[in-house]
Image: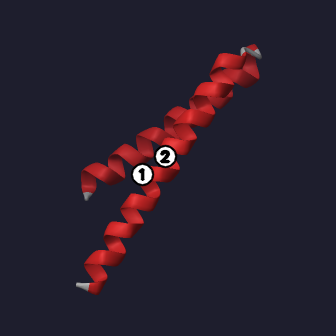
Amino acid sequence: MLLLRFALVLLLIGSGVCFGVYAFTRDQRYLRWGWVILKWSLSAALIFFGILVLERLL
């Protein structure tokens, strides 16, 4: 559970860094990478909260 939480935080930080680099350089590839990483972090968050709900039900 701690590993998943750590991965989620790293994904969100990575997405923020990509958006920051895009704001500084205006290079489209960083914007694209930022959105891809953000999608993965939202997927990881859904899995994390799904596991929490399943633990609560069992």
Question: Is 43 on the left or on the right of 15, as rendered?
Answer: left
* Residue occupying the point 42% across, 51% down: 44
Mark 1, residues whose alpha carbon is within 10 Å: few (<14), some, or many (≥20)? some
Q: x and y percent of residue 5 in the render?
A: 35, 53
User: Callout 1: helix, strand or loop?
Assistant: helix
User: Callout 2: helix, strand or loop?
Assistant: helix
Residue extending furthest bottom? Answer: 57
Viewport quadrant of the N terminus: bottom left
Establish if 22 lies above or below 1. above
Residue receiving disc 1: 44
Residue receiving disc 2: 41
Q: x and y percent of residue 58 in the render?
A: 22, 84
Type of the residue with mark 2: Ser
Q: Quadrant of residue 28?
A: top right
* Residue occupying the point 73% across, 14% down: 25
- The residue closer to the viewer here, 26 or 58, is 58
Q: x and y percent of residue 52 in the render?
A: 33, 72
Q: How is the image coloured?
A: secondary structure
- The residue closer to the viewer here, 42 or 23, is 42
- Number of callouts in the render? 2
* Residue occupying the point 47% across, 51% down: 43
Mark 2, residues whose alpha carbon is within 10 Å: few (<14), some, or many (≥20)? many
* Residue occupying the point 36% across, 77% down: 53
Question: Is 19 on the left or on the right of 57, as rendered?
Answer: right
Identify the disc placed on residue 17.
none
Question: Is 41 on the left or on the right of 27, as rendered?
Answer: left
In space, the residues marked 1 and 2 are separated at their CA atoms by 5 Å
Q: Are marks 1 and 2 in contact (CB under 8 Å)?
A: yes
Type of the residue with mark 1: Ala
